[in-house]
Image (cartoon, grey):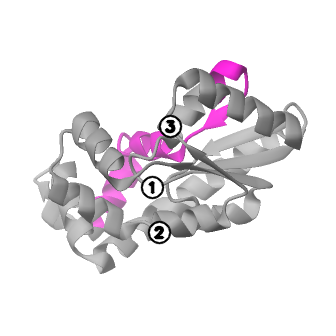
């Protein structure tokens, strides 16, 4: 089995590429989904409360307040990452072991692939790419955030040019789905 990471800075279209790969017929796993599931886990929320009590009013957790806190303070971001990453890594290992025999290719859709150090588990990395203006327009439309919040998110991610430099394959996502599908199929055929 070969593991292919799909990455790219926010708004570059990595999730769109992942959706196309699913339509082609391959499994794609996304740790962002796993992270959202964590916030429904009582034990995880207990650890968050122990470390970020200011984000709670009684038992009520304010996720937006936590997001603001970590986007404005790199130390707090690192503290949160140190809580979340072990869970995500364990889940990744379980998926790799589960599908190692069944699948020829396993895709993981991870915005922070290089930041997590997960590129070392990948046989290949695809980096989705788009110009900054397109990125910002996509994110503002999709998430309803301000340009200021967009730049806060971009600042905590590895620069897009660096992600492209380390990638095995870079795909500009400012194309039609049909063209992107052809590019992905060509890539998949080459690695198989």
Q: Position of residue 191 (x, y in %)?
A: 87, 43
Please tell me in which quadrant of the rendered image residue 104 appears: top right
Q: CA distance from mark 2 to mark 3?
A: 17 Å
Q: Position of residue 41 (x, y in %)?
A: 40, 43
Residue name at image x 18 percent, y 54 percent: 147
Q: Position of residue 88 (x, y in %)?
A: 56, 54
Contact (CB < 8 A) between labels 1 and 2?
Answer: yes
Q: CA distance from mark 1 to mark 2?
A: 8 Å
Q: Which residues are magenta?
A: 21-50
Number of the label disc, if any, that sits on residue 103: none
Local SS, label 3 = helix
| Residue ID for mark 2 | 158
The question of residue 136 being in magenta is answered with no
| Residue ID for mark 1 | 9
The question of residue 23 being in magenta is answered with yes
Is 62 on the left-hand or right-hand side of 100? Answer: left
Q: Badge 3, how many Cα within 10 Å: few under 14, some, many 20+?
A: many
Q: Nearer the viewer, residue 176 or 97?
A: 176
Q: Earlier in the sequence, mark 1 or mark 2?
A: 1
| Residue ID for mark 3 | 15
Please tell me in which quadrant of the rendered image residue 114 appears: bottom right
């Amino acid at each position: 089995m070969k593991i292919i990471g799909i990455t790219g800075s926010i708004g570059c279209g990595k999730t769109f590429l992942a959706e196309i790969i699913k339509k082609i017929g391959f499994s794609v796993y996304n740790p962002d989904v796993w992270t959202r599931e964590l916030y429904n886990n009582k034990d995880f929320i207990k650890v968050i409360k122990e470390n970020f009590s200011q984000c709670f009013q009684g038992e009520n957790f304010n996720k937006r307040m936590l997001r603001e806190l970590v986007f404005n303070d790199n130390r707090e971001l690192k503290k949160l990452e140190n809580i979340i990453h072990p869970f995500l890594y364990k889940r990744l290992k379980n998926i790799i072991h589960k599908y190692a025999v069944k699948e020829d290719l396993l895709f993981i859709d991870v915005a922070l692939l290089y930041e997590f150090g997960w590129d070392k588990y990948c046989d290949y990395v695809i980096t989705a790419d788009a110009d900054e203006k397109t990125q910002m327009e996509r994110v503002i439309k999709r998430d309803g955030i301000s340009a200021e919040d967009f730049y806060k998110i971009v600042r905590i991610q590895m620069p897009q040019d660096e992600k492209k430099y380390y990638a095995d394959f870079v795909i500009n996502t400012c194309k039609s789905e049909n063209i992107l599908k052809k590019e992905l199929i060509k890539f998949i055929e080459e690695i198989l």
